[in-house]
Image (cartoon, helix red, strand yellow):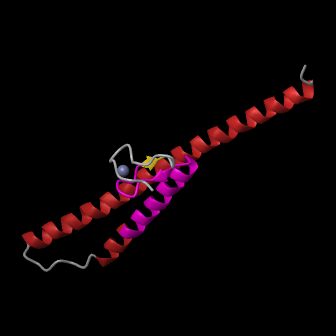
Amino acid sequence: MADINEILDKAKDLAQTAGEKSQEIYHISKLKVEITQLKMKVDKNYASIGKKVYESKKEEKELPDFSAQIEEIDLLKADIEEKRDLISTLKNAVRCPSCGADVSEDDPFCPKCGSQIN
Ligand SMILES: [Zn+2]
């Protein structure tokens, strides 16, 4: 018969694993919320550029300089990519080089787009 301490140790390990797992899930959902917020900022910049283009065309003016906004969009996109990579790492997955889906390292092909993984 197993020692009571052994049983208690096993129970402790299980509880710890469950705790780590739920923390991981919490971390992933937090990252997903942050990605949504970053995407909203990207869309806001797109809309703002579109409005400026519209107004310039309508009033037959020269297009304003968008370089600051383009730079901001690129920074936001880089931030989104970083968070996506982090989510993949937390899920023990790799990203499909073609469509960006999370794929298991063991999969030879992406289940979403069919691209070769390795
Ligand atoms: Zn894919």
Q: Is residue 77 magenta?
A: yes
**Numbered-mark total:** 0
Location of the C terminus by quadrant is bottom left
**Residue at 38% across / 43% down in the picture?**
111
Asked if residue 21 lies left or right of residue 71, the reply is right
**Residue at 26% across / 64% down in the picture?**
48
Above/below status of 19 relative to 75: above
Asked if residue 103 lies left or right of residue 26, the reply is left
Q: Is residue 20 magenta?
A: no
Above/below status of 14 relative to 45: above
**Percent of width and height locating residue 5:** 91, 29
| Quadrant hosting residue 16 | top right
Asked if residue 108 lies left or right of residue 11, the reply is left
**Percent of width and height locating residue 117:** 42, 54
**Percent of width and height locating residue 62:** 13, 80
Q: Main secondary structure of the magenta part?
A: helix
Location of the N terminus by quadrant is top right
Above/below status of 54 relative to 21: below
**Percent of width and height locating residue 43:** 31, 58
**Residue at 43% across / 65% down in the picture?**
78
In front: 114, or 43? 114
Magenta-drawn segment: 74-101
In front: 101, or 20? 101
In front: 68, or 99? 99
